[in-house]
Amino acid sequence: MSVEPLDLSISGLIYDGLGNLPKFGIIGILNGVIVSVGNEEIASREHIDATGFAIAPGFIDVHTHSDISLLHDGRGESKVFQGVTTEVTGNCSFSAFPINQANKQLHSEFLEGIGDDPFPLEWSDLNGYREAIYKNGVSINIAPLVGHGTLRIAGMGLKEGAPSPGDLERMGQLLSLALEQGAFGMSTGLTYVPSRYAPFEELIYLCKVLKSSDRIYTSHARDYDILGEDEFLGSLKEAISLARQTGVRVQFSHAAINDPNQWGRAQDWVDYFDSPDAKNLDVAFDVYPYDASSSALTQYLPGWVQAGGVDAMRTRLSEPSIFSTAAQELSLGWSAHKIPWFWDRVVIARGNGLLGVENGDSIEIAAKKLGMAPEALVLELTRLGGNSVMVVLFYRTDKDMRIFAQSKYSMICSDGSAFPFEQKGKLPHPRSFGASARALGYLSRETGDMPLELVIYKMSGKAAAFFGIHDRGSIEVGKAADIVIFNPETIKDQATFTNPTQPPVGVEYVFVNGQLVIRKGTQSDKRPGKVLNANLPAPK
């Protein structure tokens, strides 16, 4: 009896995504699924000889903000050209669901804080968002989290302080619905309005909801110690305490040390994961391989200035006496720790042409051009532009980042978005265009910090296991055929802070759900990506 050939076979050196040393093998793919991994020749309609290259699972970026960018442009160029095949979205409390149509304007203004143009929010839940993604098609997969800020706006608007019992119950119901529809967990952004208003008790309640469905809690932490124990480790201790008190799985977001007075203490921070406080808990963290961060400029304003949302902030800053008070407080530093401002280290990434500022100028340079004090420029830009003004901050060290990346508790992420290469003059952080390639090139080949199989593991198998993405992340029979083929000798990020919109070199092929999306520097018109469902059982 004749047997129909498989759709595709790939032969070469296979990194399985589980941290094992590579082995030569042949992968067989049928209907978007890996059906064989071995040494025997396979009859297939197409064969790719990847001799001289590395074959790895498609990379899973565990911390992204592609919620809206992939609605604007489903190609996901900045990520898929790196070999990223799955984006974990909904981080730092920002997600595109649930949407309370009565608070639609608040939702739209809030989502501008992740750096995208507004998009019509015509749905209410994850299923509606999933339909909107599929309407235009998407090249890569999305594993969505529920953003706590979005959840709070849907459940109680932008009210400050603790939720009422009714508010809390409403948020719990909305979170439960999202989990039933396949969300992988919930994220907080505890320096952003309104997530920053959440008391510890609110987080306990919501983490118990997550635990009941065995979903993950990810946290962009506070910039102060809510538990009153330790200024340096306080925000980490809050996240660990939530794991200890509720049993929830915890991912601490984008590990970093931004305070120059604490630079060089990364090992002290990492060591806490081995402390008695964290013993036997399911905890981890992510880090991106750069010494600079990026965010909406509004994040760095005093909390009272942001209260009530963008319209309230604009009204407040339109009053000269309040503007003056805000400028005085801002001059003392940023975050609760009053980190001193080095205005030459704060670079405008998206100024929208406001006041004639140029993208790529530091606040120091832009303020001098306009004859303004830096504090006044920051307040005026946020008054005019709300959450849409984006900046890059050079407030970290490469040494600390490398220590974070090497930890057994870490995964590699981007904290970026799947953008098109054409950015119309905007200068987004290069992490969106190069983080995965930089991890492979810089953190493995160039520094020798980690063997290649470990870096791949941190961006595939480890990520899939911790986030509960059961059907991908490794090259095994039964897993989805998300595969990247790259040259380990040449792979390198090319995106820079002054010219970020450049693809990396060294990525040869990228397959998503068995379909070829990237071939030797060219993207196909296929859109095989899926909005993944956390309720999908693990392959047998």
Image: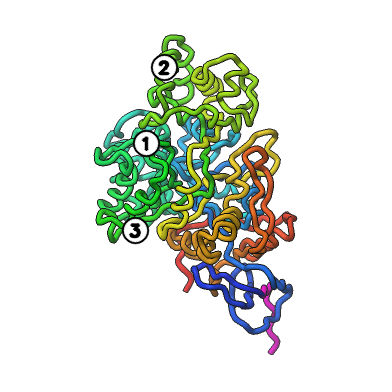
Residue for badge 1: 223
Q: Is residue 76 magenta?
A: no
Residue 259: give x, y in percent of width and height: 41, 36
Residue 461: give x, y in percent of width and height: 49, 64
For the question of whether residue 181 can be seen, the reply is no
Q: Secondary structure at mark 1?
A: loop
Identified at 48% across, 43% down, the residue is 397
The label nearer to you, 2 versus 3, is 2
Identified at 63% across, 44% down, the residue is 419
Q: Secondary structure at mark 2?
A: helix
In the picture, residue 377 is in which quadrant? top right
Report the magenta stretch's main SS. Answer: loop
Location of the N terminus (image quadrant): bottom right
Residue for badge 2: 328
Is residue 209 depicted above or below 51 in this figure?
above
In the picture, residue 366 is in which quadrant? top right
The amino acid marked with disc number 3 is Asp
> Of marks 2 and 3, which one's residue comes earlier in the chain?
3
Q: Nearer the viewer, residue 434 or 167?
A: 434
Q: Which residues are magenta?
A: 1-11
The amino acid marked with disc number 2 is Gln
> Of marks 1 and 2, which one's residue comes earlier in the chain?
1
Residue for badge 3: 282
